[in-house]
Image (cartoon, rainbow, N blue to C red):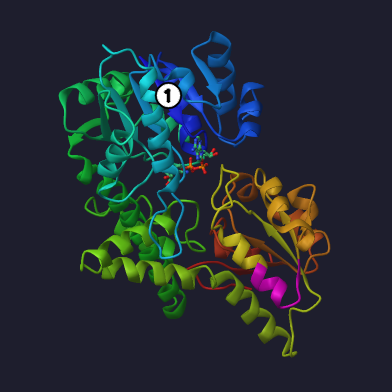
């Protein structure tokens, strides 16, 4: 099949490469000329394991190309995927201006399609509130009377393993009203589902749109839940690792997405939760469990900074115990295996420490450039993660990169002024840290020293 993928960010670029991998002919479109130039040179503008290789291979074979103009591919396209951003508006709702602007552009370009062409299947893959498929339909219909259909096909990939998630999906959710649209979507995803054994879930567009928000809300709720249990563990002398094992082994609960940490961030959960809360309010149906999830997370993002403050308040009794101190911070991305720092907890942590007069030396395997663009010289950038520790008062860990978990802690301790660690990702066991002479703060386990 021939498709257009409009928007070549984390979702669009992976979708474009993934569909090319399945044997389709794909034209990726973005209005960012710098991005398109980079991709054409074979350089991915984002870090995603395996993506560079797919982009190079399929651009070389001719099955994948990129352009600034969607008119280049619309005449022969079976489907056009909308993968542009839906950021949070001031009132919490999803800002649909990019989605609707692309819909308008598709409508204008429809005149280029042959009169006898089958209906173009316009697929909304961006995360959008219920009712958006109807709005996209209206925006296109305002510009053309050529045949088209709008499908809602939310994306569930995770940054860091996006290619694998895309080509081996657990399920493909397709909200559509006609068999033609369903057949085109099955033609596009069939190979993936055959290989993964994933489920094909056809439904109406509003249900598909709500499924995406409900999925993210459920996952966020699990994180906030285990974080709150972790906080209680610290108070009562329990160990969240054991509690997690105990509840996760119940098949009704399951063990996934129960890792306590420094609060969730990223480009999706925070904004999607706000958008869903807004939909609830608009429909006189407040989502109370979700409100609590958001509130718990707001608190959790401060947890590491609070632990640092408490440690040095106790230790020094001085009026400004963090002033002039230097901290090594391992991890900037909102999670491992990505360069994405949108809503990352590390940014709030840096703000808190800097506002108390501390200096922060940072390291990340992929997110350093993004942080440099955002924070400039407000922090120091270490050449490698060991170097970040040299002469620092303590080590803080915000992202669970596996290389950090494998670090030589004897060496790390030797570089720091004191063996003090604040581990937001529970990379180590407290008893082992105690035996090695560390003062070790983590999430949901007792502090040892
Ligand atoms: P992104 O910001 O990384 O990418 C969006 C791209 O769209 C950018 O490259 C931008 O230049 C381009 N764009 C904007 N307006 C355009 C236009 N008029 N024409 C052509 N290109 C245009 O966003 P993303 O992270 O890929 O997310 C896209 C959507 O997918 C969002 O709705 C998001 O919520 C959803 N989503 C994201 C993830 C994720 O992990 N990032 C996962 C599932 C769903």
**The N terminus lies in quadrant:** top left
Report if residue 17 is visible in the image. no
Q: Residue furthest top?
A: 61
**Front in this rendered view, residue 210 or 254:** 210
Taking 137 as reference, is 420 left or right? right
Residue 137, percent from left and from top: 28, 37
Determine whether 315 is above or below 91 in the image: below
Report if residue 158 is visible in the image. yes
**Residue under circle 1?**
4
**The C terminus lies in quadrant:** bottom right
- Secondary element type, mark 1: strand
Could you say which quadrant of the image residue 199 lies in? top left
User: Over which residues does the magenta segment extend?
Assistant: 351-359
**Front in this rendered view, residue 371 or 436:** 371
Residue 3, percent from left and from top: 39, 20
Question: Is residue 356 within the magenta segment?
Answer: yes
Going 67% across and 66% down the picture, which residue do you hit?
Answer: 350
Going 67% across and 44% down the picture, which residue do you hit?
Answer: 365
Going 75% across and 73% down the picture, which residue do you hit?
Answer: 358
Determine whether 19 is above or below 201 in the image: above
Could you say which quadrant of the image residue 60 lies in? top right
Residue 287, percent from left and from top: 26, 67
Taking 222 as reference, is 252 left or right? left
Residue 347, percent from left and from top: 62, 62
**Front in this rendered view, residue 308 or 192:** 192
Q: How busy is the neighbourhood of tag 1: few (under 14 within 10 Å), some, or many (20 plus)? A: many
Could you say which quadrant of the image residue 283 lies in? bottom left
Going 56% across and 51% down the picture, which residue do you hit?
Answer: 400
Question: Is residue 381 within the magenta segment?
Answer: no
């Amino acid at each position: 099949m021939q498709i257009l993928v409009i928007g070549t960010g984390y979702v669009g670029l992976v979708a474009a490469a993934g569909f090319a991998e399945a044997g389709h002919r794909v034209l990726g479109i973005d209005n960012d000329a710098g991005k398109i130039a980079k991709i054409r040179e074979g350089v991915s503008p984002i870090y995603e394991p395996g993506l560079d290789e797919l982009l190079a291979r399929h651009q070389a074979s001719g099955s994948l190309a990129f352009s600034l103009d969607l008119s280049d591919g619309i005449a022969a396209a079976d489907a056009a995927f909308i993968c542009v951003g839906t950021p949070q508006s001031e009132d919490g709702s999803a800002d649909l201006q990019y989605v609707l602007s692309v819909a308008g552009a598709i409508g204008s370009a429809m005149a280029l399609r042959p009169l006898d062409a089958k209906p173009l299947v316009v697929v909304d893959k961006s995360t959008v509130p219920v009712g958006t498929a109807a709005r996209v339909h209206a925006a296109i219909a305002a510009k053309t009377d050529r045949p088209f259909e709008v499908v809602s096909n939310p994306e569930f990939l995770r940054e860091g393993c996006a290619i694998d998630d895309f080509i081996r999906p657990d399920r493909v959710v397709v909200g559509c009203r006609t068999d033609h649209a369903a057949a085109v979507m099955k033609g596009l995803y069939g190979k993936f589902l055959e290989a993964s054994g994933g489920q094909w879930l056809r439904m109406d567009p509003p249900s598909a749109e709500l499924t995406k928000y409900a999925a993210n809300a459920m996952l966020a709720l699990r994180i906030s839940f285990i974080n709150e249990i972790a906080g209680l563990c610290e108070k009562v002398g329990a160990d969240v690792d054991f509690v997690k094992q105990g509840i996760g082994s119940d098949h009704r609960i399951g063990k996934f997405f129960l890792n306590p940490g420094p609060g969730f961030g990223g480009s999706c959960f925070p904004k999607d939760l706000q958008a869903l809360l807004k939909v609830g309010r608009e429909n006189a149906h407040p989502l109370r469990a979700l409100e609590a999830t958001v509130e718990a997370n707001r608190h959790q993002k401060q947890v590491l900074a609070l632990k640092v403050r408490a440690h040095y308040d106790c230790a020094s009794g001085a009026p400004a115990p963090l002033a002039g101190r230097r901290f090594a911070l391992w991890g900037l991305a909102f999670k491992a295996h990505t360069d994405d720092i949108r809503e990352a907890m590390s940014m709030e942590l840096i703000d808190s420490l800097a506002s108390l007069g501390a200096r922060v030396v940072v390291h990340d395997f992929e997110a350093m450039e993004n942080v440099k663009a955002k924070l400039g010289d407000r922090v120091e950038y270490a050449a490698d993660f060991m170097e970040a520790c040299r002469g620092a008062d303590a080590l803080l860990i915000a992202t669970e990169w596996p290389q950090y978990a494998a670090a030589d802690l004897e060496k790390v301790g030797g570089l720091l002024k004191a063996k003090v660690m604040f581990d937001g990702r529970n990379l180590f066991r407290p008893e082992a840290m105690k035996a090695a002479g560390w003062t070790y703060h983590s999430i949901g386990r007792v502090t040892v020293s």
